[in-house]
Amino acid sequence: MKETKRYIQIQTIAHQLCDIMQQHELKDIEELKEWLEHNNTAIEIIKSLIDDSELSKKIELYRQQDKEQAILSLRTKIQKHQRHRVIIRISRVAAVIVLLIGCGLLYHKLSQQEKHQTLASTISSKLSPVIITPNGQHYDLSKVLTDTTHNLNIAYKSTEEIKYTYQPPAVDIEEEGYNQLIIPNQCNYQVTLCDGSVVRLNAGSRLEYPNSFPSHERKVRLTGEAYFEIKHDGRPFMVEVRQASIRVYGTHFNINAYQETNIETVLVEGKVGVSIQDSIDQEKILKPNQLSRLNLLTGEQEIVDVDVQKYIAWTTGFLRYDNDSLELLIEDLSRWYGADFDFKDNKLKNIRISASINKDTPLEEVLAMIQTTAKIKFHLIERRYIITQ
């Protein structure tokens, strides 16, 4: 096992240091040492060198294969790389780094992995949805058990959904505080409110709502994107999005408010009215298969006929684009896959693209498809994808 660890360390450090030296154009050990001292970033670099995801992939390989064969295979690969000057130089630098920081940090990390028998390949880096109650209590929904959900007024909980206990309209109650349901990137989540209305939240979104609605109205607040199916019960339903209000007269609609200054509302079924709060302008009514684009800076609102399936495809696990900007697609990929992207040239953001992407497709496959379609390239540098022509 010690020999296995050793080769895991060497291979991981060699690959990581190669990337670091290429990025900063460092040619030898002395330049690397000087760079570390000047930037005071030794600890951060070492943390990246012993990243769990890289080490654990190798450990999983050895667990799945015969130990001796795996070690022999890794030795062969290292010997092959050592024929190249760059890898020889990197191997020397790796030894210096280990001495500079101390083997203790590295082996402590590995021993912790063995102690907990945890693999990054089997642990999701995704965050879980969180509820913040009006009194400031935080609840990680991945840790809330069924028998404790009564503390949150939740009648049912699964990995992708919560349902609140149905409550009849409350008569003459003071306005309640709002819960906050926060959905992180790489995650979709559905909540059934206390009146039976269903809200499906997209990645990177937040819904604020009370435990019970008063008798005269129902009101929620949205940040991000959500698809609503409103249950009719005689009370008006209002969605507040920053300075905008969407009054619901029908049932099925989607609101996209990821951008700070623009809000898109698409109506699938029923009727909704869109307006700016406290504005003298009257609300504009949407009909099914129509989209409202509201600019919060200018107050201008455009209504156009659209294919609504494109805008709600995310609710069924797809991302759809029809001659849309590459910038829009990349923003969606960042939210869903939790990856970071940078455009080397802002002009690339305006490239138009049409695509349908299954959100279960691995990111590497998606990027390969985009590279072919848009004739661009993705370069992974220190966990960030740089987009070039």
Image (cartoon, rainbow, N blue to C red):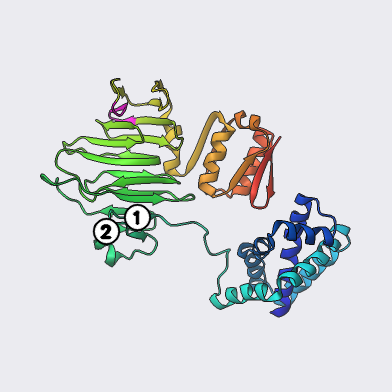
The answer to whether any part of residue 145 appears in the image is yes
Magenta-colored span: 268-278
Report the magenta stretch's main SS: strand
Name the disc covering residue 219, or none: none
**Which corner quadrant of the image does residue 374 belong to?**
top right
Q: Quadrant of the C terminus?
A: top right
Q: How busy is the neighbourhood of tag 1: few (under 14 within 10 Å), some, or many (20 plus)?
A: many
Q: Is residue 84 left or right of residue 4?
A: right
Q: Position of residue 96 (x, y in %)?
A: 79, 68
> Which quadrant of the view contains residue 156?
bottom left
Is residue 347 covered in magenta?
no
**Compared with residue 323, is residue 11 higher up or lower down, i.e. above or below?**
below
Residue denoted by label 2? 152
Quarter of the image where one finds residue 28: bottom right
> Disc count in the image?
2
Contact check, label 2 and label 1, Cβ < 8 Å: yes
Q: CA distance from mark 2 to mark 1?
A: 9 Å
Residue under the point 39% across and 50% down: 182
Residue 274 in percent (x, y) is at 32, 27
Query: Which of 107 and 350 lies nearest the eye of the viewer?
Result: 107
Return the residue at label 1. 131
Identify which residue, 256 or 175, lies in the foreground. Answer: 175
Q: Specify few, some or many for label 2: CA neighbours under 10 Å numbering under 14, 14-19, or 20 or more.
A: some
| Residue that protrudes farthest toward the front in the picture | 38
